[in-house]
Image: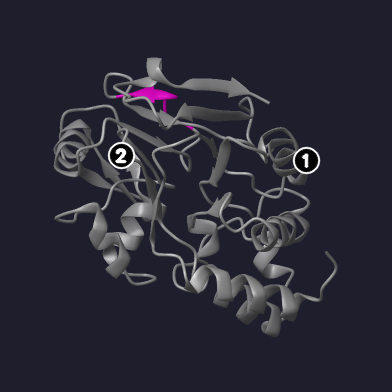
Amino acid sequence: MEMNLEDLIDRASTILENESRLIRLPPQGKVVFVGDTHGDLDASEQVLRHYLKKPYRIVFLGDYVDRGDDSEENINYLLRMKIEHPEDIFLLSGNHEGQLVKELRPANFWESLSSQGRKQYGRIFSKLPLCAASASGLAALHGALPELESLEEIDQIEWGDSNWDRIVWGDFVEGDGELLGDSWGRPQFGGAYFNRLMERYRKKILVRSHQPRAPSLMFKKRCITIFTSNAYPVSRTIVIADLEKEVRDAGDVIIERI
């Protein structure tokens, strides 16, 4: 599908405006979670080549731009595929999509854009959903959990507010505390915070990305951190889960290298 950037943004915006901030995954089929791709077009293409078919749905966890060499190609490819397969591909927001409300580094993608380009990408990124969840016990987002009464309140989160900040900027740290401080603009949360909110939201497993120095499994193997980009010195990894089976910890999903 060939289209110019303005048409791409307009068509993708129309689709995203009809999605909620919370993606409610169906109780049938399987889901593939994809970590930060950060300009790694090959990773995005590999995932879609293998899993863009029944019975899979694919959830990308944000950070499509910066770091890698093919940021614009990567995000434009994913937006085109979202337009073509709106019910099968979901693009969650990461912190690198929020440059216009909270500046970050490295920002090679953003720095390469014209003023008009920044506005166009900022417009589409402001509409990205923030979380995906299933009745089987899964939740997935970019960084850390928000402080809400229920996950359904994610639909009321505003771009740039405090809960947006927790979702796209928050880190998890092995430890028993709640809020454990702030590291260079990244709020740090411990096991007590994770366990309290997972119980409140009635979820068993959280799949996330964002934090390359975090252990891949935390909090009794209920918090899974993955990356799917050559921008990091870790294996490109995805998580595959059966939406028809209840999950309890990482042993109930497949963690696979690509």
**Residue position marked by numbered label 2 in the rendering:** 135
Magenta stretch: includes residue 127: no
Range of residues picked out in magenta: 213-218
The quarter of the picture where the N terminus appears is bottom right
Please state which of residues 239 and 161 is positioned toward the viewer in this rendering.
Answer: 239
- As drawn, the residue found furthest toward the top would be 251
In this rendering, the answer to whether 132 lies above or below 15 is: above
What kind of secondary structure does the magenta stretch mostly adopt?
A: loop
For label 2, the crowd category at 10 Å Cα-Cα, with few meaning under 14, some 14 to 19 and many 20 or more, is: some
Q: Give neighbour class at mark 1: few <14, some 14-19, many 20+ (Cα, 10 Å).
A: some
* Viewer-closest of 233 and 43: 43
The quadrant where residue 136 appears: top left
Image quadrant holding the C terminus, namely top right
Front position in the image: 56 or 214? 56
Q: Quadrant of residue 34?
A: top right
Percent from the top left, x then y, of residue 111? 69, 69
Q: Quadrant of residue 75?
A: bottom right
Q: Nearer the viewer, residue 144 or 133?
A: 133
| Mark 1 secondary-structure assignment | helix
Query: Could you give the CA–CA distance between mark 2 and mark 1, rounded to whole angstroms?
Result: 32 Å
Q: SS for tag 2? A: loop
Residue 216 falls within the magenta-colored stretch: yes
Q: Amino acid at mark 1?
A: Asp
Cβ atoms under marks 2 and 1 closer than 8 Å: no
The residue to which callout 1 is attached is 42
Q: How many marks?
A: 2
User: Does 17 sit left or right of 153 as displayed?
Assistant: right
Comes first in the chain, label 2 or label 1: 1
What residue is at 66 percent from the left and 35 percent from the top? 51
